[in-house]
Image (cartoon, coloured by chain):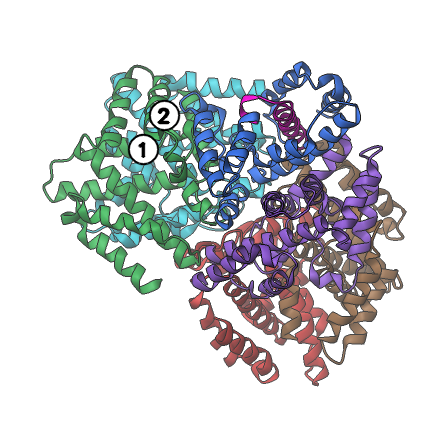
Chain colours: A green, B cyan, C red, D blue, E purple, F brown
Amino acid sequence: MLDLFFEAGNLKRLPRTGWLLRGVSNPESIADHSYRAVLITLFLADSLRERGVDIDVERALKIAILHDLAEARITDIPLTAQYYLDKKRAETRAALEIFIKAGPKARDYFELFREYEEGLSLEGRLVKFADKLEMLIQALEYEEAGFRNLDEFWSTLDDLRKSEFYEHFQDLVEGLAALRKQKC
Amino acid sequence: MLDLFFEAGNLKRLPRTGWLLRGVSNPESIADHSYRAVLITLFLADSLRERGVDIDVERALKIAILHDLAEARITDIPLTAQYYLDKKRAETRAALEIFIKAGPKARDYFELFREYEEGLSLEGRLVKFADKLEMLIQALEYEEAGFRNLDEFWSTLDDLRKSEFYEHFQDLVEGLAALRKQKC
Amino acid sequence: MLDLFFEAGNLKRLPRTGWLLRGVSNPESIADHSYRAVLITLFLADSLRERGVDIDVERALKIAILHDLAEARITDIPLTAQYYLDKKRAETRAALEIFIKAGPKARDYFELFREYEEGLSLEGRLVKFADKLEMLIQALEYEEAGFRNLDEFWSTLDDLRKSEFYEHFQDLVEGLAALRKQKC
Amino acid sequence: MLDLFFEAGNLKRLPRTGWLLRGVSNPESIADHSYRAVLITLFLADSLRERGVDIDVERALKIAILHDLAEARITDIPLTAQYYLDKKRAETRAALEIFIKAGPKARDYFELFREYEEGLSLEGRLVKFADKLEMLIQALEYEEAGFRNLDEFWSTLDDLRKSEFYEHFQDLVEGLAALRKQKC
Amino acid sequence: MLDLFFEAGNLKRLPRTGWLLRGVSNPESIADHSYRAVLITLFLADSLRERGVDIDVERALKIAILHDLAEARITDIPLTAQYYLDKKRAETRAALEIFIKAGPKARDYFELFREYEEGLSLEGRLVKFADKLEMLIQALEYEEAGFRNLDEFWSTLDDLRKSEFYEHFQDLVEGLAALRKQKC
Amino acid sequence: MLDLFFEAGNLKRLPRTGWLLRGVSNPESIADHSYRAVLITLFLADSLRERGVDIDVERALKIAILHDLAEARITDIPLTAQYYLDKKRAETRAALEIFIKAGPKARDYFELFREYEEGLSLEGRLVKFADKLEMLIQALEYEEAGFRNLDEFWSTLDDLRKSEFYEHFQDLVEGLAALRKQKC
């Protein structure tokens, strides 16, 4: 297990390449992103439960924590590369091998990973929603700081609007959209 | 809630000052540290449950996710300052006000924070164990990379050895100690 | 004394957190700021003396050099934290203990620090004026470089305008205000 | 062609991930590496020609200049990922599409790329030799600066010793090996 | 020769000071710039040859590779300093001594350097054209990323328009000018 | 005068090239160095006065504050370049022109600069002593942090030992030498 913890350290050292390629100097690490995605998942999952949605919060949190772990081996392959590489397949295979280090529950962890990757469960899809929301919040923070060149990220707003969670989190999504309009 | 997510972004921008003051250039962010502390908590909590320990994994994860959130306002006050400032009191008050942004469950979140801060629950103490373990793993990573001047951090090893969790995670703790002896 | 010189090295390693929190990547260090605050003090103090103001230039320079030294222990606590922490009291106590390392003149140095902190002397207040002017010049430099999100810093302009030194340095203050209007 | 020049700018922004993963903070960019690999190629190729080897120096230089260009899309995929991804295939396909931007000579440039990738020509193999030599020189520079954790890179020394160019550049290779022994 | 390769490593470590002084944080290295200048030279030289211009491509590439090598000793002296220092003379003398490390062909390399420095040959002048084009492309990339304060660099556009190569590369130059108008 | 303050901002942006060339990533700025050199001057000058040495402390402080200001135009030209460039002459001429911005006292400031540059006064020579001491303290800090490759800086220790101030500050100099022996 110690070995797995060391390997996760790569996520601190590796930059999120989407920002890097658009000229953000010293962008956030993958771990930076993962942390806030986890945090957002916590508040969204609790909020859904309060509203009567039948959601397994522990499961959602675990998915959020593990969803980018394979990038400790694969790195944050940017869109420009995904046309030439099967990123999803690579991450899936790497995830499987990383989780083996975790001992007897490896299969369970891998199952959580697949729920995210394939959108197989409500919890997996919520993490995907949180993941995209996190990215847009970061995009706005960079834009507020003065960075430009991030327009194309905002097409993700449509994904959020079409999501099954939009009815619950319309305020969040439209609040973010309004902030962007106002500030940029 | 959106406001809370933006505030959490500070954890990405703020460095861990302990490393900074000892000359580590571009050290990890608070969010970097928090992420791996959360990850470690996940594996340790699941492992305890497997061993028959009665632990609330969801609760442990939430504590880990929230335990450093107050630093988004207070920053990572280093030891050199703690003699002059009541860091704990400041973080507690800031945590309370941050959680108010989260709506009706603010009280619950604050309770989780206090479980960590005061060691009131098994889950709170496990996160403290994970938090220290994470710090030592990072210390070793910096030492392996060539940084020196980090000896004093290793006194934390004794805290881990005296912890109630040591019986369960002796292999982890001594594995780390052995790695350090071998590599540094 | 050597020990004091080493401790002052922290000011090189610690970032100015005000910029950091607003998204300036790799902002200036505390020492960077202190240096220009000292330089500005030199020219302002000399200029006041030329205009017949009875000012002790050596005293003013010493105050400027020492005014941020306590941050070597306390770090640059940002506004978000000052609501929860007694920064002034912490810096005052830390300053006292740092100056003790300087030997028999410790009391004198502490007195200089308090003149700044409490605005007890013309020289102490001049350094406060220089300190704020330095911050605004830096804000404009970051804005010229493309960083945004720094509007709130400019409320400090009013402090400069209400200062007793405004009559002498109106040209400087309004020159800066005009530059900002023109460029941003 | 302008578009191609902009795309090549990615090589300045992207770090060499091998160093990054071993804890070198702010490592060189891909372009940094490429530049010195090109420079080394120049001197080695000229030297070979002087010694009577029948080598096309222009061809060698072009191969060196173009050999990492595909990484502008693919990024510097580290060894940890290559087990899961077909890096070579991805780079080959990306290279082909990038060169199309260069107009009628696209085929020729792609041919040069393949000479490197597949070791089809003396010139292609020389660039591979220069590429590895450059990496080891950089490794030694990082080690001299204090970074550790780079031992495994030095197995590449054997590749250089087994190369067809070793007879010509034994002094270089063994000079480097001796420097390392002496300094580290 | 090994010694020369080590010395060239300085070009990776040294920033381009023009950007630094205008507030670009973590600007490109000299090697970053040199790499793309070499790449541009390759495509421009090949293109000229295709159009029937009598140009020695190998010679042009060598000049591009070597044209900034003296900065490994002299650093990238900015315009603010050139009024007080004879940069050209210093670089010329440093180049001569660096090339001596390259052995018997030192004189030839120095000749290439002078062709660039003095514009003595078509190839030397082409590298100057490529060098300026590279700088403007980088300026636009920084501007697209959000950096400001780079207006004065664009006077170089006139140099490109007055160049003997403008008739061949009007599309490139005006394409760049149009992009800037559109984006900034 | 505002213009002079802006120009001094360059000292924050420019790295100390001596560290940079030896592989220290993100080294201190010129302003970082200047700040501590000023601070050291303060304590040394006061200490000398206490011991009955006839020294003008205000004068010493002003010299320390101004002694590197010319580098705002000239940058920190490293030793590798000084063989090819007349750094001293360049800095002297730049200092003169910078001080003209300070108004009627320009001549006085220039005189202070020359006292340092030429060692014309006790105060000028004290700043040179403080400047070297600062550099060695920084060298030790980098070495403690893990950076290597800084041996040659320590020849400066001899300069300190031969200085007229050694009799007063033997404890400081030998204390530093002892620390280095112990730690490195």
Kindly indicate whether the residue at mark 2 contacts the one at mark 1 (C-beta within 8 angstroms): no
SS of the residue under disc 2: helix
Q: Judge by depth and name the residue closer to the eye, C115 or B47.
A: B47
Quadrant position of residue E139: bottom right
Residue at the image point whose x is 19% and y is 41% from the top: A46
- Asked if residue F29 lies in the magenta stretch, the reply is no
Sequence-first disc among 1 and 2:
1
Amino acid type assigned to the residue bearing label 1 in the image: Ile
Magenta residues?
Answer: D116-144
Residue at mark 1: chain: A
Q: Is residue F64 above or below residue D16?
A: below
Q: Residues within 10 Å of mark 2 (few under 14, many from 20)?
A: many
Q: Is residue D178 above or below residue D67?
A: above
Q: Position of residue A33 (x, y in %)?
A: 37, 41
- Name the residue carrying label 1: A65
- The answer for how far apart the CA atoms under marks 1 and 2 are is 19 Å
Residue at the image point whose x is 26% and y is 53% from the top: B101
Query: On residue A90, which mark appears?
Result: 2
Amino acid type assigned to the residue bearing label 2 in the image: Ala
Q: Main secondary structure of the magenta part?
A: helix
Q: Residues within 10 Å of mark 1 (few under 14, many from 20)?
A: many
Q: Position of residue B87 (x, y in %)?
A: 43, 48
The C terminus of chain D lies in which quarter of the figure?
Answer: top right
Q: Is residue C141 left or right of residue A15?
A: right
Q: Is residue D104 above or below residue C175?
A: above
